[in-house]
Amino acid sequence: MGKQFARIEPEHRAFIERQKIFFVASAPPKGRINVSPKGLSSFRVLGDNDVAYLDCTGSGSETRAHLIACDDKRLTIMFCAFEGPPMILRLYGQGRSLMRGTPEYADLAAGFEDMTGARQIVRLSVELVQTSCGMGVPLFDYKEERSSLVRYWTKQGLDNLRKYWGLKNNKSIDGLPTGFVPEAMAPPL
């Protein structure tokens, strides 16, 4: 049975902090819905209705494009218990993309472990917290974080990272602009 809450309760925060993976869902007014898995210990609860995650360079930038395209900036973040008691926790609200090199990014960056290839912090103003049973989610044992993404961008170097941002992170798969300006972004290395 699902339950709804107006804020992140202490037990929700404890649950979130134990999770090794989370999923981010966004959608433009028209076009494809995107769901992305995230990890690397990149999520932080900033307050009762405020969370953020450090976003590393990937093959696209759907979340940023969707936040730019939507007037309501809607974003959903979901956590699932893959060990211990079952639970699914969703955070619904309005998101913002804080690009590397901006004062807003710098204000929050100290709360995260800096990672080579980090390009933005996505911040969510939480409007609704929903929990549900999660009894259909299988059990998995956590082994370790993958270090290949950070290793890859470290090896590529700043120039290749900026080229990649310009080539692969400039538009969504539906052609929506992301607003990435690689030359203006502070060095991530």
Image (spheres, rainbow, N blue to C red):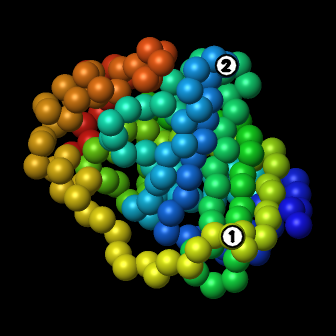
Whole-percent x and y of residue 89? 72, 62
- Disc 2 crowd rating (10 Å Cα; few below 14, some 14-19, many 20+) is few
Relative to 45, residue 63 above or below: above
Residue depicted at x 69% and y 83%: 85
Residue 130 location, quadrant: bottom right
Q: What's under tag 1, amino acid-wise?
A: Gly
Is residue 145 or residue 35 the one in the foreground?
Answer: 35
Q: Is residue 102 left or right of residue 134?
A: left
Mark yes or no: residue 150 visible: yes
Q: Is residue 151 left or right of residue 62?
A: left
Is residue 135 or residue 23 the one in the foreground?
Answer: 135
Whole-percent x and y of residue 163? 19, 26
Say which label, 2 or 1, has the lower sequence index: 2
Q: Where residue 29 is drawn, which disc sits there? A: 2
Whole-percent x and y of residue 65? 51, 24
- Disc 1 crowd rating (10 Å Cα; few below 14, some 14-19, many 20+) is few
Is residue 29 or residue 15 the one in the foreground?
Answer: 29
Callout 2 secondary element: loop
Mark yes or no: residue 96 visible: no
Residue 96 location, quadrant: top right
- Determine contact: label 2, label 1, CB under 8 Å: no
Q: Which residue is mark 1?
A: 136
Whole-percent x and y of residue 67? 59, 27
Residue depicted at x 88% and y 67%: 1
Residue depicted at x 64% and y 55%: 78
Q: CA distance from mark 2 to mark 1?
A: 31 Å
Callout 1 secondary element: loop
Residue 45 location, quadrant: bottom right
